[in-house]
Amino acid sequence: MSIHPTAIVDPQAEIDGRAEIGPYCVIGPDVIVGPGTRLVSHVVLENHVELGANNVVFPFAVLGGAPQDLKFKGEPSWLRIGDGNQIRESVTMSIGTAHGHMETRIGNGGLFMAYAHVAHDCLLGDQVIMANGVSLAGHVTLGDRVIMGGMAGVHQFTRVGRAAFVGGGAMVARDVPPYCVAQGDRARLVNINVIGVKRAGWSKERIRLVRQAFKRLFFGEVARLTALSEVEAELGPRDPAIAEICQFVRESKRGVALPRRPRVSSEDDDLDE
């Protein structure tokens, strides 16, 4: 175990022998730090925090701070962070509340850039990227491989589905379905996340099929529920991503982000980029 002499570590904290605690870090009694995790310097871990393996936390991050919620009464809730995350300068992540899950949960392999904020009771999947200054209100859910552009914000109780992309500066007040791109204030749907799914190895044929479903669901002439039933029946069985999008829409409580006009182009130029 490597603990710098200037660090203040409560003797009740559970620090793995392969962890590294840098200068001027402050670690409270109810903290667990896993193997290979490195706190660079000036990191604060307070309340109930569990950090998995091989995370890197940069200076002035505060993990496990009390929720910015007037209903919080000091309940012993948690912030649980998985493995292999990079948490950059001045990131803040709060513990959960009794009005939520009693925990805030971060997956594996994420990148949280400077000044990003994850509020109480948020649930984040694996390989999430939050660019500089992104803020999540309480009870937000981000699926695996979601990318949030710089300075974007997400309203409480809102969901962003797997592999979705939210543009920089967007204000997300309604759910963003999986594999979609949302931009603007208030964030509206503009396309599927072509770049993201190409990186995931999707073929051009699959991208065209999912984009066809996207256009029928959000840019068609029929009512949303009618389009949803039609797409579920006709295209859902042909691709699991389409079925996932349809299920996400059906389960939405806040409503799904509206489309942005004009219609999605029928051109395939972006498939060759």
Image (tube, rainbow, N blue to C red):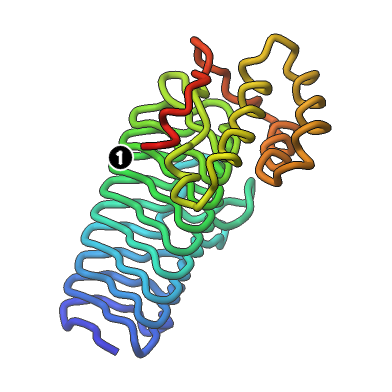
Whole-percent x, y for residue 144 in the image: 53, 52
Q: Is residue 210 above or below residue 52?
A: above
In the drawing, does residue 123 fall left or right of residue 151? Answer: right
Front position in the image: 183 or 154: 183
The residue that appears at 36% across and 39% down in the rendered structure is 134
The residue that appears at 53% across and 34% down in the rendered structure is 180
Q: Is residue 160 visible?
A: no
The residue that appears at 48% across and 36% down in the rendered structure is 193
Whole-percent x, y for residue 129 in the image: 39, 49
In the drawing, does residue 53 fall left or right of residue 115? Answer: right
At label 1, which amino acid type do we have? Gly
Q: Is residue 203 visible?
A: yes
Tell how many labels: 1
Whole-percent x, y for residue 68 in the image: 44, 43
Q: Secondary structure at mark 1?
A: loop
Whole-percent x, y for residue 18 in the image: 34, 87
Figure quadrant of the N terminus: bottom left
Give neighbour class at mark 1: few <14, some 14-19, many 20+ (Cα, 10 Å). Answer: many
Q: Is residue 62 above or below residue 243?
A: below
> Which residue is labeled 1 in the image?
133
Figure quadrant of the C terminus: top left
Front position in the image: 247 or 239: 239
Q: Is residue 61 above or below residue 227?
A: below
The residue that appears at 39% across and 82% down in the rendered structure is 35
In the drawing, does residue 230 fall left or right of residue 221? Answer: right
